[in-house]
Amino acid sequence: MSHAAVLLKYQDMLRLSQSMLDSARHGDWEALITHQSARGAIEAALVAIDQLTWPPGVAEQKRTLIEQVLAADAETRERVQAWMSEIDGSRRSAQTEKKLQGAYLSGS
């Protein structure tokens, strides 16, 4: 596979990483999962096909794409962790409310 074809795969991976971030920013968790699955397939393909020796200029393009993917991933991860913390807080609040209702009803 040519350098140009492999770079296109990295660009596809970046596009999907940015779509994942966009989904996380909008709280569209199902879309995030869909994009993540598609990106996973591209990552697997890249592991299999990226056996090239990269000329310096093209290697720089590849490095830039990978850095952008990692930056998008970092923000996506932060947003997912915040959402999970929010869910955990809601779950704990519901458990506390249930305990209080149980104590109130058994005390009446």
Image (cartoon, rainbow, N blue to C red):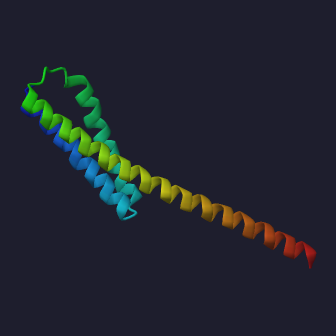
Residue 87, percent across and down?
A: 56, 60
Image point (8%, 25%), residue name: 55
Q: In the image, residue 58 lies at what x, y percent?
A: 9, 32
Q: In the visual, does 16 lie left or right of 103? A: left
Observer-nearest residue: 62 or 99?
62
- Left or right, residue 62 beside residue 79: left
Q: On the rendered image, what quadrant is the C terminus found in?
A: bottom right
- To which quarter of the image does residue 92 belong? bottom right
Specify whether residue 26 is in view. yes
Q: Is residue 51 above or below residue 82?
A: above
Q: Residue 66 in the image: state x and y as whole percent.
A: 24, 38
State the residue at coordinates (49%, 53%).
81
Residue depicted at x 34% and y 47%: 73
Q: In the rendered image of this protein, does residue 77 appear above or below residue 82?
A: above
Q: Quadrant of the N terminus?
A: top left
Residue at (52% x, 56% y) in the render = 84
